[in-house]
Image: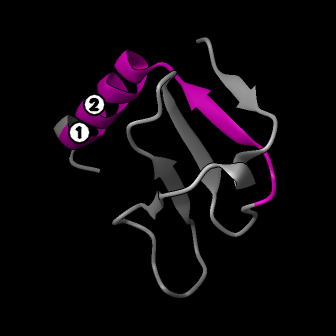
Amino acid sequence: MSERITPDPTGLTAWRKSSYSNSDGGSCVEVLDNHPTGVPVRDSKNPGGPALMFHSAAWSAFIADLKHSGR
């Protein structure tokens, strides 16, 4: 897998929280759509921390697999 860590994810705007995240502060994942080099993913509880950058095709395959498995 070819993830890359973005050096400063706080400079990126328009993050959206996963629809599976809850309001209790549980597992919260945020993604940034329409980024020119891939799909940045970060922990919403640590917005200044690192973000993983996935190739768009890899992210799409991951989401399709989750939908297929019913998760």
Label 2 sits on residue? 65
Q: Residue at x 72, y 62 (%)?
A: 47
Query: Could you say where residue 6 lies in the image, as x and y percent from the top left?
Result: 73, 33
13 up-or-down from 50: above or below: below
Q: Which of these two is toward me, 32 or 61?
A: 32
Examine the rendered structure and indicate whether residue 46 appears above or below residue 8: below
Question: Viewer-nearest of labels 2 and 1?
Answer: 2
Instruction: Residue at the far bottom: name it.
Output: 24
Q: Position of residue 51 (x, y in %)?
A: 69, 42
Neighbour class for label 1 at 10 Å: few (<14), some, many (≥20)?
A: few
In the drawing, does residue 54 fall left or right of residue 2? left
Taking 35 as reference, is 12 left or right? right
User: Which span of residues is magenta-colored?
Assistant: 48-67
Q: Are marks 2 and 1 in contact (CB under 8 Å)?
A: yes
Counting from the top left corner in percent of width and height, residue 9 is at: 71, 47
Asked which secondary structure carries label 2, the reply is: helix
**Which residue is under mark 1?**
69
Q: Residue at x 27, y 30 (%)?
A: 65
Q: Which residue type does callout 2 highlight? A: Asp
Disc 1 on helix, strand or loop? helix
Q: Quadrant of residue 46?
A: bottom right
Please check the rendered image and state whether residue 15 is part of the magenta-colored stretch, yes or no.
no
**Rounded to the nearest whole Å, what is the CA distance between mark 2 and mark 1?**
6 Å
